[in-house]
């Protein structure tokens, strides 16, 4: 029997998005193959439904605790209308791989695009599905670096100690010691590069987005270091403080995005804990009458970090009335916050010095 004779058999007409498909009467092997194809198609559609993104954005709409900057991340949603398959090209059903790839691409692009808007925002949050959960490698709530980083993580974290020593010498105006830090920190360029490429090495869009974010922070860190070097050559203390503040901020953000924090605090805001507590219970000077200056020990009296203590490391002269505060050490990490000066109030009474001043002084 010829193909034309087979085609003259009974036909079954189905409608799909307005297109008509005609199926000829087929022999038993062909029928079996057809049924198997339908099963695979149905399975693919079921799997694609399992990978639908939640209705809420998978990328945060703003940086957590970025109180002083209007910084936003574009929300990324999976829209079924955007994933319609072309009947001519995808007659075998919706591809799970295509749906997941398009979603990850959008998230990676959103993450990368958000970095350029965050010049002086606080540490960047990343989408929830990029971070580890209970039972995964790494710190819960942080991005999970690849297994090939080796000892690079420890080397990156060791920069924190150098930054602490630099803060000590700068605030004591030891220019003879301060001048040597620029070259010391520049020697870490290969370490930052190696970690960025090793921690998130794949070509999937999320890894690409994280690499872009990390490279941006490294670029801003070393650009601030160059400004710091120029300020120290002129012995311009205020400019050096601002440059050091930017260095600290971008390094803090690198640690956060790179999954290098030793812990993750998922508390959104501390303000609810102070409801019903009189402000007079926090002993501080009125920041409007006696504003905190660089080197002053402060307590944050407003915002998500209310009640946390630290030291002012820089005051921005750009008219924003913002200052950079290096929070007191918590589980080995000293986070950086950029807040309005009216939020950072000088602590009163006898206080222990900032812990950088307890680091033994290097011999000159």
Image (tube, grey):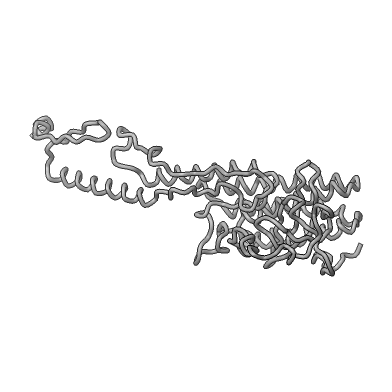
Placement of 332 over or under 229, stated as above or below: below
Looking at the rendered image, the quarter that the N terminus falls into is: top left
Expressed as whole percent of the image width and height from the top left, the position of residue 27 reads 12, 42
Looking at the rendered image, the quarter that the C terminus falls into is: bottom right
The residue under the point 72% across, 58% down is 301
Q: How many marks?
A: 0
Expressed as whole percent of the image width and height from the top left, the position of residue 192 reads 68, 52
Expressed as whole percent of the image width and height from the top left, the position of residue 121 reads 67, 48
The residue under the point 15% across, 45% down is 29
Expressed as whole percent of the image width and height from the top left, the position of residue 6 reads 10, 34
Placement of 31 over or under 278, stated as above or below: above
Placement of 360 over or under 255, stated as above or below: below
The residue under the point 80% across, 54% down is 287
Of the pair 296 and 291, the residue shown nearer to us: 291
Of the pair 225 and 314, the residue shown nearer to us: 314
The residue under the point 67% across, 55% down is 303
Let me know if residue 186 appears in the view: no
């Amino acid at each position: 029997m010829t193909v034309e004779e087979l085609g003259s058999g009974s036909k079954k007409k189905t409608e799909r998005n307005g297109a008509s498909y005609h199926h000829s009467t087929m022999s038993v092997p062909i029928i079996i193959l057809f049924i198997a194809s339908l099963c695979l198609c149905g399975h693919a559609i079921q799997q694609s439904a399992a990978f639908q993104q939640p209705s809420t954005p998978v990328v945060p709409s703003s940086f957590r605790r970025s109180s002083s900057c209007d910084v936003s991340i574009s929300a990324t949603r999976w829209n079924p209308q955007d994933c319609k398959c072309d009947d001519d090209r995808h007659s075998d059903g919706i591809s799970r791989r295509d749906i997941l790839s398009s979603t990850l691409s959008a998230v990676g692009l959103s993450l990368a695009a958000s970095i350029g808007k965050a010049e002086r925002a606080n540490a960047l949050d990343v989408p929830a599905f990029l971070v580890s959960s209970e039972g995964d490698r790494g710190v819960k709530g942080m991005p999970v670096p690849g297994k090939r980083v080796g000892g690079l993580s420890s080397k990156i974290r060791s920069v924190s100690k150098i930054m602490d020593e630099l803060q000590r010498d700068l605030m004591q105006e030891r220019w003879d010691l301060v001048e040597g830090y620029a070259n010391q920190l520049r020697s870490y360029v290969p370490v930052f590069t190696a970690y960025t490429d090793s921690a998130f090495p794949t070509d999937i869009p999320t890894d690409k987005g994280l690499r872009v974010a990390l490279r941006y922070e490294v670029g801003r860190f070393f650009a601030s270091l160059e400004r710091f070097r120029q300020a120290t050559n002129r012995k311009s203390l205020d400019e050096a403080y601002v440059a050091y503040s930017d260095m600290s901020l971008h390094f803090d953000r690198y640690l956060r995005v790179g999954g290098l924090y030793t812990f993750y605090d998922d508390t959104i805001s501390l303000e609810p804990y102070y409801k019903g507590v009189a402000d007079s219970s926090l002993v501080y000077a009125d920041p409007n009458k006696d504003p905190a200056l660089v080197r002053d020990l402060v307590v944050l009296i407003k915002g998500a970090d209310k009640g946390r203590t630290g030291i002012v490391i820089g005051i921005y002269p750009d008219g924003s009335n913002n200052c950079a505060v290096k929070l007191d050490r918590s589980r080995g990490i000293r986070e950086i916050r950029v807040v309005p000066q009216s939020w950072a109030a000088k602590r009163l009474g006898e206080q222990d010095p900032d812990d950088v001043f307890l680091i033994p002084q290097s011999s000159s």
